[in-house]
Amino acid sequence: MSRPATRTILAAHYRTGETHEFRLERGRVVSTSRVRKAATAVFGPGFVDLQCNGYAGVDFNRRETEPIVIAGAIRAMWEHGCTTVLPTFITAAADALDEFLDDMVKALSTDAEATHSVPCFHLEGPFISPEDGARGAHPKAHIRPVDLKLWKRLQKIAGGRIGLVTLAPEVRGAMNFITQLRTEKVLPSIGHTLADAACIHRAADAGAMMSTHLGNGCPQVLPRHTNPIFAQLGEDRLLASFIADGVHLPDEVLRALWRAKGGGVLVTDAMAAAGAPPGLYSIGELAVKVGPDRIVRQPGSQNLAGSALTMCEAVANLVRVAHIALADAWDAASLIPWALLRQAGAVRGPLGSTVLATWSGGELKVEAALRGAKVLWQAGE
């Protein structure tokens, strides 16, 4: 379907409620003005996903994925309001990680607009706990203690664009590595860990800033009080990310964790099935099945292997589950993760993107995604 020549959208600012008129014409925002009219939509900053393993049928952790396909997956996220994403690479053989990063770099070199959506990458593993439950769906054979030689090689292949690393603070070499990451302007995050409270505290002292998908990446059964969830929940220096898909965390658990932490960051942990129909997919070495319920199941295991969640769904789900205002959920998916990346030094400047969406019946539906005066995507295209 061709793009309409001209479109006018009346949208209320997601926090102030002030109505603005957006005139879109031939892929550009030709004017914006404050008006005294009833809004039909809401607008706010573009969504920032710190953890995304794939999208629209494309697995970022699969060998020999064509660059044009990868760039297309980045563009597909715009339809769901995600204008900024950190492609995430999980534990794999060293040569496989080399290839995944190289493919992503090549993909971004071919598509300037997709490149603007990817300020940096997220490396989730391989420096995580090898224990069952804690490692989740990460292949045990490739988990290892911190390896500085490997880190330097991966960062070189990435062109210095790895901006977030998830690791377990109890693995050998982790504490010094966390401090090193901060000096290199990389955000260190704790995840897939069995660390106790003392270890978590030392990690925060060393410079850890976030907990990756808190409440997940841990065994199904844990000690009642002394466990890595409470240890991270009680460390105020760690901002937490959460997967609000109704599967990774039951509603009452997400609500309790969100309130205990005083908020956090929304991520999708999406894999190839996000923005795609049910079916058979991969995430790295794993074959997974996604049914009509949109749950990503690893055959023969209780482990979840990513999600099929989109950012606009995550925002809507958090409003419903945590009983918070749309503006607060919107910030958790946009300004807060961007500010965290800026605090670490992984990115600079303002976010610079805008999403216009309708908000009705607990559903957030994107009407347009903008970067500055450029229309990245709009409904009806």
Image: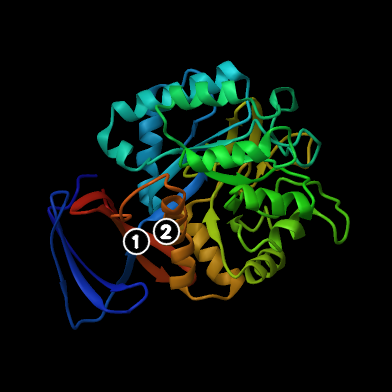
Is residue 50 positioned above or below 357 on the image? above
Disc 1 packing (10 Å; few <14; some 14–19; many ≥20): many
Q: Earlier in the sequence, mark 1 or mark 2?
A: 1
> 154 or 324: which is nearer to us?
154
Are the two marked residues, 1 and 2, in contact with CB atoms closer than 8 angstroms? yes
Query: Which residue, given by chain and number where applicable, does mark 2 sit on?
Result: 334
Is residue 317 positioned above or below 141 on the image? below
Callout 1, which amino acid? Answer: Pro
Callout 2, which amino acid? Answer: Ser
Kindly indicate the quadrant of the structure image that contains residue 124: top right
Task: Calculate the distance from the C-alpha at mark 1 to the C-alpha at mark 2.
Answer: 6 Å
Residue 302, position as x, y percentages in the image: 78, 42
Disc 2 packing (10 Å; few <14; some 14–19; many ≥20): many
Q: Is residue 189 left or right of residue 328?
A: right
> 377 or 237: which is nearer to us?
237
Q: Residue at x 38, y 40 (%)?
A: 118
Q: Quadrant of the N terminus?
A: top left
Residue 110, position as x, y percentages in the image: 28, 26
Residue 353, position as x, y percentages in the image: 30, 55
Q: Is residue 82 left or right of residue 349?
A: right
Query: Which residue, given by chain and number where applicable, does mark 1 sit on?
Result: 45
Asked whether residue 214 is in view, the answer is: yes
Q: Residue furthest right?
A: 223
> 31 or 130: which is nearer to us?
130
Q: Is residue 131 left or right of residue 42?
A: right
Is residue 25 positioned above or below 283 on the image? below
Is residue 244 positioned above or below 125 on the image? below
Q: Which mark is residue 4?
A: none
SS at mark 1 in the image: strand
Residue 48, position as x, y percentages in the image: 43, 52
SS at mark 2 in the image: loop
